[in-house]
């Protein structure tokens, strides 16, 4: 079984990881730099950054020294927040967060499973900070540098 993530969520997480990896550097990170490093089209990335800004996860500054940065340190942003910026707060099945839409709510055995699955997945994403993800990336880069 495959639970699929949207392209927005996957690419948005990569953009957030990029910002986390460059968080301690002075200044802002341009969308063009992120797009180049993450191999994402600039136009699509700008759309994702707008969504992340609306979710309160990034801030932007216009101008020559402008760009994007995280609104909080990477250790204070978890993957569930990033997921929520793109996928929303609904469960994997709409009936789990909006039971009145389904006539079978009281009799449906699968609804409970979808709700539990969502809770487990969100719990995992809440337990992983952007700093944790950045450290995983740094560790992978170090291994690649030693073996490559």
Image: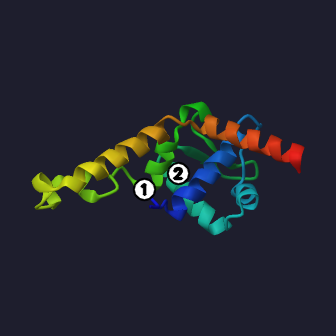
The scheme the figure's colours follow is: rainbow
Q: Residue at x 82, y 41 (%)?
A: 142
Which residue lies under the disc numbered 1? 87
Judge by depth and name the residue closer to the eye, 65 or 142. 142
- Residue pictured at 81% horizontal, 42% vertical: 143
Q: Secondary structure at mark 2?
A: helix
> Viewer-proximal residue, 13 or 127?
127
Depth check: give the residue in front, 84 or 142: 142
Q: Verify CB contact (< 8 Å) between mark 2 and mark 1.
A: no
Q: Residues within 10 Å of mark 2 (few under 14, many from 20)?
A: many
Q: For marks 2 and 1, give the one nearer the viewer.
A: 1
| Screen quadrant of the N terminus | bottom left
Q: What residue is disc 2 on?
A: 52
Q: Residue at x 62, y 61 (%)?
A: 45
Residue 97 seen from this side: no
Residue 64 shows which numbered tag? none
Residue 104 in view in this figure: yes
Q: Give the quarter of the image for residue 140.
A: top right
* In front of the other: 5 or 110: 110
- In the rendered image, residue 131, in percent from the top left (x then y), is placed at 63, 35
Left or right of 8, for residue 100: left
Instruction: For label 1, count other residues whose C-alpha is less than 10 Å away and answer few (under 14), some (14-19) or many (20+).
Output: some
What is the C-alpha distance between the residues marked 2 and 1? Answer: 12 Å
* Residue 147 % position (x, y): 87, 47
Q: Earlier in the sequence, mark 2 or mark 1?
A: 2
User: Where residue 103 sits: x, y (%)?
Assistant: 10, 61
Is 58 rendered above or below residue 8? above
Question: x and y percent of residue 86 in the render?
Answer: 46, 56
The residue depicted at 83 percent of the width and 47 percent of the height is: 144
**Numbered disc 1: secondary structure:** helix
């Amino acid at each position: 079984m495959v639970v699929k993530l949207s392209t927005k969520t996957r690419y948005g997480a990569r953009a957030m990881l990029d910002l986390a990896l460059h968080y301690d550097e002075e200044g802002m990170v341009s969308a063009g730099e992120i797009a180049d490093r993450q191999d994402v089209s600039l136009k699509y990335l700008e759309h994702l950054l707008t969504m992340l800004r609306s979710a309160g996860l990034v801030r932007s500054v216009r101008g020559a020294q402008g760009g994007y940065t995280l609104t909080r340190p990477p250790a204070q942003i978890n993957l569930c927040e990033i997921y929520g910026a793109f996928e929303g707060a609904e469960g994997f099945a709409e009936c789990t967060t909006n039971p009145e839409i389904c006539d079978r709510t009281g009799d449906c055995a699968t609804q409970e499973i979808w709700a539990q699955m969502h809770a487990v997945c969100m719990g995992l994403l809440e337990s992983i900070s952007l700093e944790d993800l950045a450290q995983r990336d740094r560790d992978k880069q170090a291994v690649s540098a030693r073996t490559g």
